[in-house]
Image (cartoon, rainbow, N blue to C red):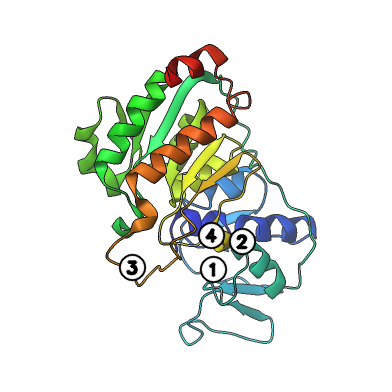
Amino acid sequence: MGGLGDSLLVYPVLEILKKRGYHLTVWGNSEYFSLAKIAGFCNKVTFYEPKEHFDLRIIFSADRETFSSSDKTIFVDPFVREKIWIIDYYLKSLNLEGEEFSKILNIGIKTKKNSSLCIIHPGSGSKKKNPEIDFFLELDKILKKMGFNTLYIIGPAEERQGNFFIKSLFVNNVLDLAKNLLKASLYIGLDSGVSHLSSYLGVPSVVIFGPTDPVIWHPIGENLFVIRDNSCLPCFPSICKELKCLDKKFLIYEIERLLCKNIKKLKVSKAQVMGMKD
């Protein structure tokens, strides 16, 4: 019953088990796992505990006492104790190391790309991971100088922030969220479920990490660009007061440098970049 990002990080396990011939039922947040069913990674998604007989039960929880178990039950602690990518940890825990899984989530939606659209998600599941709102206002100016039209995706956690942005879209349905993300040629966000989904869908995604460790928690995706000030060690959940890792000047500089370096991949014209520098 974790968040969207936590749910998406389980998808590779589902995909691998499905390839091995299992008929899969997923018990969890049924909306967040609905995309797994669309992608063909499972057969059924349920919010309530299934009562059928299963040949194998895999439970992602550190709480073993709450769940009934048998010799056919495998518990996976969702909190990794070593500095490796959470998906590698899951596969290692389940003896699935080396198995191939999709780097792009195919949910069969054909959407026309808008070459100038940059979608920004200004929030996350924890305020401790978010820079100040003026960072996004400064970022917006830079993106517009580069020729992007910005659209802010606002979810239930950021509903109050919608008033800060001229153009924002409230989305609280994961399928609608995916459809909108697929229209963008660029996405910028924080360590959030929306960022995980954007990267997994193959949208070129700039993801800002602050107190959390991207080595462990980075999204799935081949067009992923992670920004983090590595001079400040990850400290989540015991957040330091300074939050130097989310310094506005550092983030703006790094994003501007990254976009200039990868401009061809992001389909922005060289003339627009030169205009920004001027």
Contact, mark 1 vs mark 2 (Cβ under 8 Å): yes
Q: Amino acid at mark 2?
A: Thr
Is 236 above or below relative to 257? below
Q: Give the spatial CA distance, label 1 vs label 2.
A: 8 Å
Please state which of the two labelled residues, at mark 2 or mark 3, is closer to the viewer: 3
> Circle 2 is placed at which residue position?
25
> Circle 3 is placed at which residue position?
239
- Determine the residue positioned at 56% across, 45% down: 35
Residue 241 is situated, as x and y percent measured from the top left of the image, at 27, 65
**Would residue 180 be found to the left or right of residue 269 on screen?**
left
Q: Secondary structure at mark 2?
A: strand
Q: Amino acid at mark 3?
A: Ile
How would you rate the neighbour count of disc 4 (Cα within 10 Å): few for under 14, some for 14-19, many for 20 or more?
many
Mark 2 or mark 3: whose residue is earlier in sequence: 2
Q: Give the spatial CA distance, label 4 vs label 1.
A: 29 Å
Q: Give the spatial CA distance, label 3 vs label 1.
A: 38 Å
Q: Amino acid at mark 1?
A: Pro
> Circle 1 is placed at which residue position?
50
> Circle 4 is placed at which residue position?
217
